[in-house]
Amino acid sequence: MAAVRRGSAPSTALSSVPLQMLMCLSGTCSALYFLATLLMIAYKSQAFSYPQERLALDLALLSLMGALEAPRLYLGTKGNLTEAEGPLAASLVLTVASALLSVYFLLWQTLVLWADAVLSATLLAVHGLEAVLQVVAVAAFVS
């Protein structure tokens, strides 16, 4: 085992602190988004004429979005902290899928309220920034 000499240059860490901070923020935003969207769907189903098949689709897609969040954050955090491009790339794929679901709730949901648009656009912006930082981190890990 080689001894570390005093005064020697420390090894450089490639993990991204901004990405790690954004992942923490994204987890909180996603949890709040899920809860707020679920409550708005419940409100819209009572206050408006909401077709049952569309209600089922919106709830299924919201559930899928919630189910993708835990593995997305786990793989992203693991990949970033261990400087492994595999888990981080898998998290990037899940981030893109989650962003597409955000676009659905922003544009194509059965009834889009002003609050839906604001929440979805905010989550989409967070996911977009996170995807950019993930691509940069993967590029740094590969080189």
Image (cartoon, grey):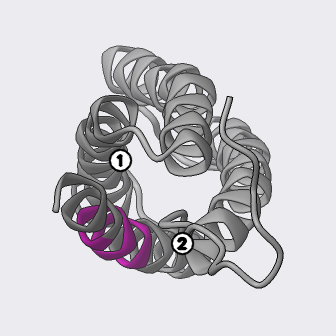
Q: Is residue 57 above or below residue 26?
A: above
Name the residue rendered at 61%, 80% in the picture: 18
Q: Quadrant of residue 71?
A: top right
Q: Quadrant of residue 17?
A: bottom right
Residue 51 at x, y = what percent?
37, 26
Q: Residue 18 vs residue 134: left or right?
A: right
Compute the Cα span from label 2 to label 1.
Answer: 27 Å
- The residue stretch that appears in magenta: 129-136
Residue 104 colored in magenta in the image = no
Q: Residue 96 vs residue 69: left or right?
A: left
Residue 135 colored in magenta in the image = yes
Q: Is residue 67 above or below residue 11?
A: above
Q: Residues within 10 Å of mark 1 (few under 14, many from 20)?
A: many
Task: Quickly name the residue at label 2.
Answer: 12
Residue 76 at x, y = what percent?
50, 43
Residue 85 at x, y = what percent?
30, 41
The quadrant in which the C terminus is found is bottom left
Name the residue rendered at 68%, 43% in the picture: 34
| Mark closer to the observer (2, 1) | 2
> Disc 1 residue type?
Thr
Residue 21 at x, y = what percent?
71, 71
Task: Quickly name the residue at label 1.
Answer: 95
Q: Nearer the viewer, residue 10 or 130?
A: 10
Q: Is residue 81 above or below residue 86?
A: below
Query: Does the magenta stretch mainly form a helix, a strand or a loop?
Result: helix
